[in-house]
Image (cartoon, rainbow, N blue to C red):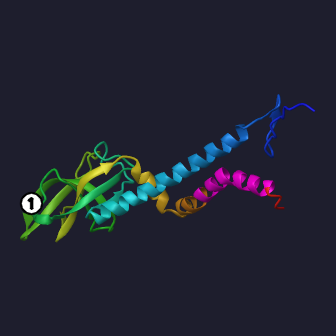
């Protein structure tokens, strides 16, 4: 017998020239890390929305291109409450449309007095014509503070059923991919069946 010993390959590893191939293990690690990174991105986007809400902002996902190029589709729009008396021409506001009760984000293009109330004419930046009806806003309205392009897509997905499932299952799968072989190897070395 010689005093030289050969390395013992890991379970499932391919032996090439006396050495165990580690590429399957590395691939599993990479997939696991990517899965965790995806979940952290989704979780981070939800935490961003929660944090901005705590700071007094309201957040909206932009689904329409009516405010492009100022606010792109898929952006996360953050607004602050504003008093109606403080609104001016040029302000971008988010409000409920009186006709169909949808939430709109448009720019104020004119303000007029009618029967003692301020009537706002709004228009999307991408539109050629102003909105057909003037809007009477009472109390407070949301005024655009800033937007974060494309983050709305992530937030929208994270709020969906698929996003919630992904936030729960992918980290578990990632941890299993990264730690499973180590746990299995530890059990095998102790002779646990």
Q: Please tell me whether residue 182 is drawn above or below residue 49 in the rendered image.
A: above
Residue 102 in sight? yes
Is residue 183 part of the magenta span, yes or no? yes
Residue neighbourhood size for the residue with mark 1, other residues' Cα within 10 Å, grouped as few (<14), some (14–19), many (≥20): few
Q: Position of residue 182 (x, y in %)?
A: 70, 52
Q: Nearer the viewer, residue 54 or 145?
A: 54
- Residue 82 spot, x, y in % from top left: 17, 63
Of the pair 55 and 184, the residue shown nearer to us: 184
Residue at the image point whose x is 16% and y is 60% from the top = 120
| Residue under pointer 1 | 112
Q: In screen coordinates, is 29 left or right of 47?
A: right
Kindly identify the residue that appears in the image at 62 percent across and 55 percent down. 175
**In the image, residue 124 lies at what x, y percent?**
27, 50
User: Which element type, helix, strand or loop, lies under badge 1?
Assistant: strand
The boundaries of the magenta stretch are: 171-189
Q: In the displayed structure, does residue 32 sit left or right of residue 147?
A: right
Percent across and percent down for residue 6 are 83, 34
Instruction: Label the magenta part by its dominant secondary structure.
Output: helix
For residue 79, side relative to residue 183 (left or right): left
């Amino acid at each position: 017998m010689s005093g030289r010993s050969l390395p013992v390959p890991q379970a499932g590893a391919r032996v090439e020239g006396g050495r165990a191939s580690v590429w399957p293990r590395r691939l599993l690690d990479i997939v696991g890390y990517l899965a965790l990174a995806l979940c952290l991105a989704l979780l981070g986007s939800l935490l961003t929305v929660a944090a901005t809400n705590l700071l007094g902002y309201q957040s909206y996902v932009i689904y329409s291109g009516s405010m492009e190029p100022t606010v792109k589709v898929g952006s996360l729009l953050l607004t602050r409450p504003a008093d109606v008396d403080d609104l001016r021409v040029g302000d971008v506001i988010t409000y409920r449309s009186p006709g169909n009760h949808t939430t709109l984000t448009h720019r104020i293009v004119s303000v007029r007095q009618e029967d003692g109330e301020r009537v706002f004419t709004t228009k999307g930046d991408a539109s050629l014509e102003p909105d057909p009806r003037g809007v009477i806003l009472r109390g407070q309205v949301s005024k655009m503070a800033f937007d974060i392009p494309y983050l709305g897509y992530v937030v929208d997905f994270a709020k969906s059923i698929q996003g919630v499932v992904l936030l729960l299952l992918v980290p578990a799968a990632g941890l299993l991919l990264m730690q499973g072989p180590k746990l299995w190897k530890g059990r095998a070395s102790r002779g646990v069946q």
